[in-house]
Amino acid sequence: MKNTKEMRTWLDDLQLNHPLVIAGPCSAETENQVLKIAHELKDTDVNYYRAGIWKPRTRPGNFEGVGALGLKWLQKVKEETGLKTATEVANRTHVELALEHDIDLLWIGARSTVSPFIVQEIADALKGTDKIVLVKNPVNPDLPLWLGAIERLNSADIKNLGVIHRGFSTYEKSKYRNNPEWQIAIELQTRFPDLPLINDPSHITGKRDMIFDVSQTALDLNFDGLMIETHVDPDNAWSDAAQQVTPDRLVQIMQDLRIRKETDPEADYNNQLNNLRAQIDVVDHQLIELLGKRMKVADGIGQLKKQKNVAVLQSKRWNEILGKMVLEGSDNGLSEEFVLRLFKAIHQESINHQEKIINK
């Protein structure tokens, strides 16, 4: 993969004094709606005007977008407001039509990213383009699948790449529409620190009153920008009404967000930071040692179960542990979500240890 600093050039070239902002309706509904929103956003810090033209819906019968007609509306947006335009593409035909209508930024949606066939078709259609192409994370929490999509586009000599973090589906109950799974986005950021990373708080939250908090978290984690769905009449939007904000609310969100410094040069800050990090290193070492000890106990349990021909999984015992740990975690300032994720991972490792012993 090429040096990611080359990929960041398009973002650097914008010379922004604030995070990148991509905003506009979930769906283009009518020409009047598209233009009205655009005119309300033209004198704000919005850099790209987004609108869904083709809308992949989970079930048939729902509004699936106005189709290619909406691209002409986006052309009018650029002519009348000067805003650059953005839309989602999901196949070669979408790409060709978007390029014909001079759309400035294209993104590949979460449902498309899961399919290497679809991504390759889009990459072939975009080969050598200087358009900005962003890749949303796949629906499921699969970092290699996300990286694979980026690599396919990079191999097609697409010069201006970036990614959009829009959260991940889960069968478990959550306050989010799509769990952020921040650690996956952080891992991608760690591997490719110069690949522009955009957060989509609208799809993560599914609720407009949560957008500010998720946006702030993203900026605290050094994301480069935000994609926020914006509509003049959100409650009556034809798709995803609950997660869209008005242009006025978008402006307020942007004003209220705090932009953090990457670091501070003061010696006192760095001395304190290094001291605290040293303490974390010690505790992390202790955690690994404790987990190793726990797995040795699990090995002993595995030996005993093997001798007595007892099944590895003991659901009643597991549920007792989980309930107790959630309560103890709360007493120690740990969220239920974190404790559940942690102990499920520990439990799975314990099962793996016991299965190896029983199946020897």
Image: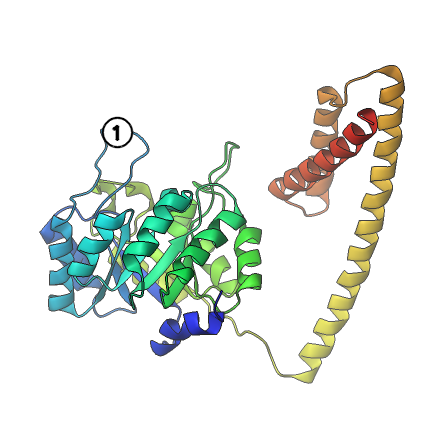
Q: Residue at x 36, y 68 (%)?
A: 159
- Position of 244 compared to 63: left or right? right
Q: Nearer the viewer, residue 13 or 130?
A: 130
Residue 46 appears in the picture as rendered: no
**Of 57 and 127, which appears nearest the observer?**
127
Q: Residue 136 in the image: state x and y as whole percent.
A: 40, 52
Give the residue at x 29% y 65%: 129
Horizontal side of residue 341 vs 58, given as left or right: right
Q: Which residue is mark 1?
A: 60
Q: Position of residue 312 (x, y in %)?
A: 77, 23
Left or right of 147, for residue 240? left
The amino acid marked with disc number 1 is: Pro
Q: Where does the C terminus fall, quadrant-wise?
A: top right
Q: Residue placed at 35% from the left, 45% from the top?
A: 118
Query: Helix or strand or loop: what does disc 1 sit on?
Result: loop
Residue 220, percent from left and from top: 52, 63
Instruction: Say which of 233 and 109 sits in front.
Output: 109
Q: Is residue 281 left or right of 89 when viewed as pictured?
A: right
Mark 1 surroundings: few (<14), some (14-19) or many (≥20) residues within 10 A = few
Q: Residue furthest top?
A: 309
Question: Which residue corresponds to the image point at 31% horizontal and 61% vertical from the top-left?
Answer: 127
